[in-house]
Amino acid sequence: MGKRLHIIGLGPAGLDKLSVGSYRRLLQADKVFARTLKHPCIEDLRKEGVNFVSFDPVYEEEDSFEAVYERIVAGLQAELEEGREVVYVVPGHPYVAERTVRMLAERLSPEVEIIAEAAVSFLDEIFTSLKLDPTEGLVIKDYDGLRDAGLTGEDWVIIPQVYDALVASNVKLDLMLTYPDDALAFVVKGLGTDQAQTREVPLYELDHEEYDYLTSVVLPPEERVASFRKLTEIMEKLRSPGGCPWDREQTHVSLKPYLIEESYEVLEAIENQDMYNLCEELGDLLLQVVFHAQIAHEANVFTVNDVLREITEKLVRRHPHVFANGKANTSGEVVRAWEEIKKEEKKDPEREKDYFKEPKGLPSLMLAQATQGRAAKFGFDWPDWQGPWQKIHEELGELQGAMAEGDGIKEELGDVLFAVVNLARFLNLDAEEALRASVHKFQSRFRKMSELAAREGRKLEGMTLGEMNLYWELAKTHEKSGKVAWA
């Protein structure tokens, strides 16, 4: 017979929650190692003559739980080296919120036979106390795993071993990232004992309760929790036969203007540094993504999960320096690697014939700058900024000639703009952003003109151009002196 480690769960309370087999095993053992003696079953077993060796002192000696768990595992490993059979008891169930058990399983198998023996689970007591049916949806999370748990509010949530007010405070703060502050929470303690308590509290008061090692926090389903899944369900309902007539009529094509509009409203919020509005506008933009995905789902083309899968796989695939063995120490190296991977992904003989693959729906300045950048990769470019600078003057002359002849004006004006964009590229400036900033500057000065005129009891309407120019110059003076707030 090889080495054996018996891991026995003590359940939520006293001896009556242990199985007969576990009870006999404990009585037969010369000594029993306990993660902690803070459990009502321990006292009952001591009265029955069970000899316990506790790891409680380790909690006082170490600064972190991870260090405590390492000490416990090392101690049990040392005992197994000296003898064939070791008995180890933990509160509750051996595989529920028991980090030491997971560590033992990882490190000792297959050299040591691990036999886990469960008592009545604290979950059974919670199900009974709260009349909770786990088939309706149940999530069990340790208190330090809530922040990234992706809780949707659709399931019951159980957080075991909330043993003091500090842990309860962290649980509260993590849950309030998702749940409303006044969401209902149950604090359950001592279930299965004659001191059992179940209290209902609003989430914001969670850390005002008393806690011990037999306390769990339970949250019922909460419809006010925001989640991506809920958003997709709302969109599905809006598009259903009993939903909204307008939403049901929309197509990929009819939604194009809204997608563009919402994108620009996001840009405007960023430019205004309006974070509150940015939050709202990002939601509107996300709605467009979900809208298109729902339409595609109804046509059996793809689903929103396909969209998520595609972008997740793409991000991992195009960041080998993060998720694989690739190397990239600068943002420039990242961009070059990204383009190479992208090129391999989209290898297509027909597509390769087209040098310019940028979306044709891009704003003209962005399209021009991307096109010039693409040509530059093949070496078709000026050696420095003086080339586009001279080209601007050349194109201005041709535009002047076209205006004099009254023919080809639109084409020549486009050439001037294209040359200006090329200069912006050499200056490492975004032509779209540069023009947008100038537009905003013009708007700000124009508003200031009107304000200055109004102070003198005048209106811009009816002024001569010369008079307006005077107010324009005055507005510029105010602007440079720092008296004008930018738009």
Image: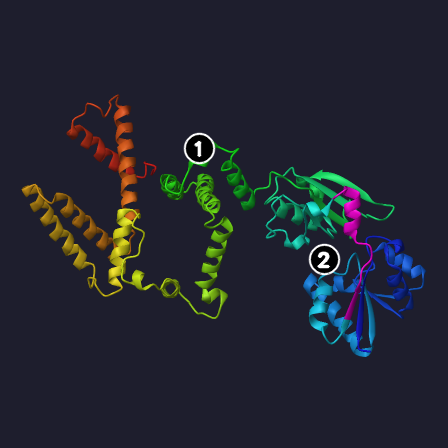
The residue singled out by tag 2 in the image is: 97
Residue numbers of the magenta segment? 114-132
Badge 1 or badge 2: first in the primary sequence? 2
Quadrant housing residue 179? top right
Image position, residue 101 (x, y; %): 74, 64
Image position, residue 236 (x, y; %): 52, 40
Label 2 crowd bin: few (<14), some (14–19), many (20+), radius 10 Å: some
Residue 377 in view: yes
226 or 280: nearer the viewer: 226
In the displayed structure, 340 sits above or below 132; it is below
Residue 322 is left or right of residue 333, and the answer is: right
Residue at image position (31%, 54%) is 358
Residue type, label 2: Ala
Residue type, label 1: Trp
Q: What is the CA distance from the residue labelled 1 to the residue labelled 2?
A: 49 Å
281 or 309: nearer the viewer: 309
Colour treatment of the image:
rainbow
Residue 87 is left or right of residue 225, and the answer is: right
Q: In terms of secondary structure, where does tag 1 sit? A: helix
In the displayed structure, 55 sits above or below 452; it is below
In this rendering, the count of numbered labels is: 2
Q: In terms of secondary structure, where does tag 2 sit? A: loop
Residue at image position (48%, 59%) is 313
If the image is split into quadrants, where does the N terminus sit? bottom right
The residue singled out by tag 1 in the image is: 246
Image position, residue 481 (x, y; %): 29, 39
Residue 117 colored magenta? yes
Task: Give the residue furthest to the top.
Answer: 457
Quadrant housing residue 10? bottom right
Q: Which mark is residue 286?
A: none
